[in-house]
Image (tube, helix red, strand yellow):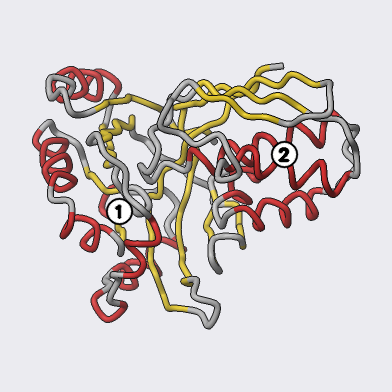
Amino acid sequence: MKILSPAKINLFLHVSGKRPDGYHDIVSLICCVSLYDVISFDFGGGITTVTCTDPEIPCDERNHALKAASLFLGKFRTNEGVRIHIEKNIPAGAGLGGGSSNAATVLSCLNRWFGNPFPVEEIMAMGLEIGADVPFFLYRKPALATGIGEKLKEYPLKLPYKILIVYPGFGVLTQEVYNNLNLRLTNCKNKLKKLIFVQEFHAKLLCNDLESVTVSKYPEINEAKEAILKQGAAGALMSGSGSSVFGLFLDNDSAINAGNVLSKNRRWRVFVVDTIC
């Protein structure tokens, strides 16, 4: 059994405050895009393992897919194991949610395989135990996420753009970015009302409160953003806590031409994708 596990981008990310538990409250517009890991499942035997085509991805208890499988099988109280293989296409530490998407894909697949023993709400709760982004990947629709990202409201996204993603060749630790965030310097709140009431998302609404924090330590992220804008993007933004930057292009040819130019930078990986609605 092979399942596609998609990436995501944050079109909007406002950090509104820090909670007593150390997490941050956010308001974020998130959508899946057509960049996928491919996850294979082989059932049988009593051992659960994960392997991955990317040697830099840990396949021990730190791996989100393995966490998801262990959590599900433990709650289901079965001795059956599953061998999971990840064909990794989504860069790690890129703000594209690859690990969270893998975890959601594993939870969803195991629930179907075993006859849906858990309701959606319980699968969502399992996902949240693994990471704040996992419930979104179980939801799989463009959504306005609040709380720590677990409260999801469907967003009727109309996005008349082709998307180009640039991964600058290095990952970023999300916790490090949040630890360095100064809430007094966030600026996306001013666009929040327009985001909530808009009928069609416009590039002018792009905003990410984490971008300035990450760029201050990794200036190449801003270099990628400027390169995308130079190629004619209607707007560009860092996704999540970084390191990837995406640009919105008005048509497919413009995005592909820009991708061909930016791919000449050998440090970067470039993807031209669509939103998944």
How crowded pointer 2 is (Cα within 10 Å; few <14, some 14-19, many 20+) is rated as many
Measuring 76% from the left and 27% from the top, which residue is drawn there? 82
Residue 23, compared with residue 177, is above or below; it is below
Please report the residue visible at 51 percent of the width from the left and 20 percent of the height from the top: 87
Q: Position of residue 27 (x, y in %)?
A: 46, 65
Picture coordinates of residue 5 (x, y %)? 57, 30
The residue to which callout 2 is attached is 69
Q: Are marks 1 and 2 in contact (CB under 8 Å)?
A: no
**How far across and down, in percent of the image, does residue 26 sit?**
46, 67
User: Which residue is at 45% across, 54% downward?
Assistant: 29
Is 123 left or right of 247, judged from the image as shown? right
Image height of 85 relative to 115, above or below: above
Determine whether 129 is above or below 256 in the image: below
* Along the viewing direction, whichever of 227 and 108 lies nearer the viewer: 108
Judged left or right of residue 5, residue 1 is right
| Secondary structure under the numbered disc 2 in the rendered image | helix
Q: Decide which of tag 1 and tag 2 comes sooner along the chain.
A: 2
Which quadrant is home to the C terminus? Answer: top right
Relative to 199, say whether 31 is above or below. Answer: above
As drawn, is 10 to the left or to the right of 135?
left
Kindly indicate the quadrant of the structure image that contains residue 3. top right
Identify the residue position indicated by label 1 in the image.
Answer: 206
Label drawn at residue 52: none
Tally the marks: 2
Determine the CA span between mark 1 and mark 2.
Answer: 35 Å
The disc labelled 1 sits on which kind of residue? Leu
| Label 1: which secondary element | loop
Q: Quadrant of the N terminus?
A: top right
* Residue 197, position as x, y percentages in the image: 45, 62
Task: Say which amino acid is labelled 2.
Answer: Ala
Q: Residues within 10 Å of mark 1 (few under 14, many from 20)?
A: many
